[in-house]
Image (cartoon, helix red, strand yellow):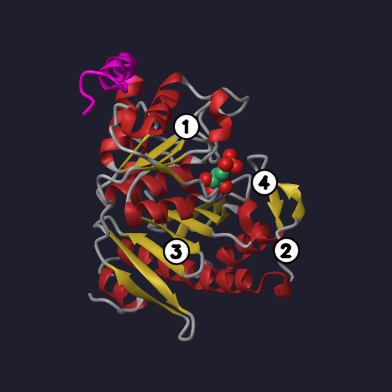
Amino acid sequence: MGQGQTLSAFLDSHAVDPQRKAVAAAVAAIAAGSIEISELIGQGALAGITGAAHGGSNADGDVQKDLDVKADEIIVAALKDVPYAALASEESDTLLDGDPSAPISIAYDPLDGSSNIDTNMTVGTIFSIIPNQPGVKPFTAPGSCQIAAGFVVYGPQTSLVLTLGDGVDIFTLDRKAKVYRLIRERVTVPADTAEYAINASNHRHWEQPIRDFVDECIAGSDGPRAKDFNMRWIGSLVAEVYRILTRGGVFLYPGDNRPGYGNGRLRLLYETHPMSFVMEQAGGAASTGRERVLDLTAKTIHQRSPLIMGSIDKVKRIELLHTDPSAASRSAPLFARRGLFRV
Ligand code: F6P
Ligand code: MN
């Protein structure tokens, strides 16, 4: 393995048994589909892609954009020769059945962040691969059972972030050669970055522990965290995760009090499970605030889960604010502007 190595050479060295061969084939197929999606996005209106509503909504009620539908068709077509037992897509109501004796099943979000298409901003494709056990219904095991996961981010560069359960590697699309090449090996989440990401327009709907954490960030060097924070919200999960893998920080899409948002907005099987697997494999953490996301099991395909992920210290602090709400008031007076521990 080394910088510049192609994704296909990297996958070849992984494919040593039937299950790993299926994983390698699935990742290669998704990568091939993503090159097509990347080209479509790059062409935009020139290729007839405008980000306009397609006229329908997906199983979870999101308005479908033209590219959501096209990207889903591209991924299904790319996977046609891959031995899978079932596919779970954000864009279909039910599972797409394959060969029940196949070694793997795959969940994917063909186009994450689709509200960003018409604004020429970053979007992505997310995937999660689980082992299939003949006779056992797919997608009924906790997220810790994933054997591979990752995502493609269609930004100024198109990059593929991948874990095969042994660290995280990043590949960038070489547009001339139409292949992905390794650019970062064994990625680790920087530990002490003072950056957070949350959709602050939902402030009035948040539970108290989330308000307490954000208040601590806003209080900056005058607050209990004793440092100034920076805030970023891109509105594309893939872009937020890529940023955290690059420079650390924390992302929050918590449950809130809006109807239907008790478990936040993100979907477990093809958004929070794979991103949590990537985050843990890169030395970060992912939690609902109360439990590890990878310990959750889906009861329905489009089930949602809260997601708080990134640098371990921040995820742990947010968990503490959930399990011991007095932690917020305990630290606040001590660190207030003229408090005991202010220097
Ligand atoms: O797929 C859901 C998604 O588009 C994520 O990419 C993004 O993090 C989130 O929704 C944005 O949600 P909101 O519009 O509530 O800020
Ligand atoms: Mn999505």
Residue at the extreme right of the image, as rendered: 55
Image coords of residue 30 (percent x, y): 48, 66
Nearer the viewer's eye, disc 1 or disc 3?
1
Circles 4 and 2: CB distance less than 8 Å? no
Inter-mark Cα distance, 1 to 3 = 35 Å
Between label 3 and label 2, give the one nearer the viewer: 2
> Looking at the picture, which amino acid does disc 2 mark?
Thr
Circle 1 sits on which residue?
254
Which residue has dot 4 on it? 58
Disc nearer the start of the sequence (3/4): 4
From the viewer's perspective, is the residue at label 1 or at label 4 nearer?
1
Quarter of the image for residue 273 reads top left
Sequence-earlier tag: 4 or 2: 2
- Residue tagged 2: 50
Query: In this rendering, is residue 135 above or below 129?
Result: above
The residue where tag 3 is placed is 83
User: In the image, 143: left or right of 39?
Assistant: left
Q: Amino acid at mark 1?
A: Pro
The image quadrant where one finds the C terminus is top left
Q: Secondary structure at mark 4?
A: loop
- Dot 2: within a 10 Å radius of its alpha carbon, few (fewer than 14), some, or many (20 or more) residues? some
Would residue 195 be seen by someone viewing this image from the given angle? yes
The spot of residue 25 in percent (x, y) is 40, 69
Give the distance between the C-alpha atoms of the residues marked 1 and 2, in whole angstroms: 30 Å
Range shown magenta = 323-343
Q: Relative to 199, is 130 on the left or the right?
A: left
- Going by the numbered disc 3, the residue's amino acid type is Pro
Name the spot of residue 230 as percent of width and height, x first.
41, 44
